Image: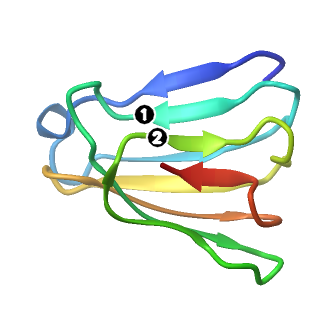
Amino acid sequence: ASSEFTTTLPTVSAAGAGWNAKFILNDAGSGTVKVIPDSSEDTLIGMIASADGAAAESAESGVDELIWVASTAAPGDWAELMCDGNNYYVHGQEHDADHMTLA
């Protein structure tokens, strides 16, 4: 993304159990990329593992942003989300630490 880009997810009740999506960064560009739940929810739970063996980015309770960091993210960094009707569960992988955050 050459500028900031944000994708807003449907509410967990609208998405329903079984809703899923995979997001893959294909161009690091210079903009921050965000996947966020509906503004009324903090429903992202999960972990982004780092291929370089660094500590994973994680959220053990609901948070409101999955972010590909503009200054460090690389093509191929990815995250998959699955909804159970109550939360979105996130798992993914980044090339190096701090390419992505769950906050």
Q: Residue at x 28, y 29 (%)?
A: 10
Please report whichever mark, 2 or 1, sits nearer to the chain's N-terminal start. 1
**On screen, 82 above or below 92?**
above
Residue 40 in the image: state x and y as whole percent: 20, 27
How many numbered discs?
2
**On screen, 17 above or below 34?**
below
Q: Is residue 78 left or right of residue 41?
A: right
**On screen, 62 above or below 55?**
above
Question: Tag 2: residue type?
Answer: Glu
**Label disc, if present, on residue 36 of the rendered structure:** 1
Callout 1 environment at 10 Å: few (<14), some (14 to 19), or many (20+)? many
Q: Quadrant of the N terminus?
A: top right
Residue 57 in the image: state x and y as whole percent: 58, 66
Going by the picture, which residue comes out furthest to the front?
Answer: 103
Foreground pick, 30 / 19: 30
Circle 2/circle 1 CB separation < 8 Å:
yes
Q: Which residue is mark 2?
A: 65
Question: Tag 1: residue type?
Answer: Ile
Q: Residue at x 38, y 40 (%)?
A: 64
Callout 2 environment at 10 Å: few (<14), some (14 to 19), or many (20+)? some
**On screen, 46 above or below 17?**
below
Residue 33 in the image: state x and y as whole percent: 65, 31
Whole-Å distance between the Cαs marked 2 and 1? 5 Å
Going by the picture, which residue comes out furthest to the top?
Answer: 3
Residue 60 in the image: state x and y as whole percent: 34, 69
Q: Residue at x 83, y 78 (%)?
A: 52
**Label disc, if present, on residue 99 of the rendered structure:** none
Q: Secondary structure at mark 2?
A: loop
Q: Secondary structure at mark 1?
A: strand
Q: Is residue 5 left or right of residue 25?
A: left
Q: Is residue 17 left or right of residue 72?
A: left
Q: Residue at x 61, y 74 (%)?
A: 56
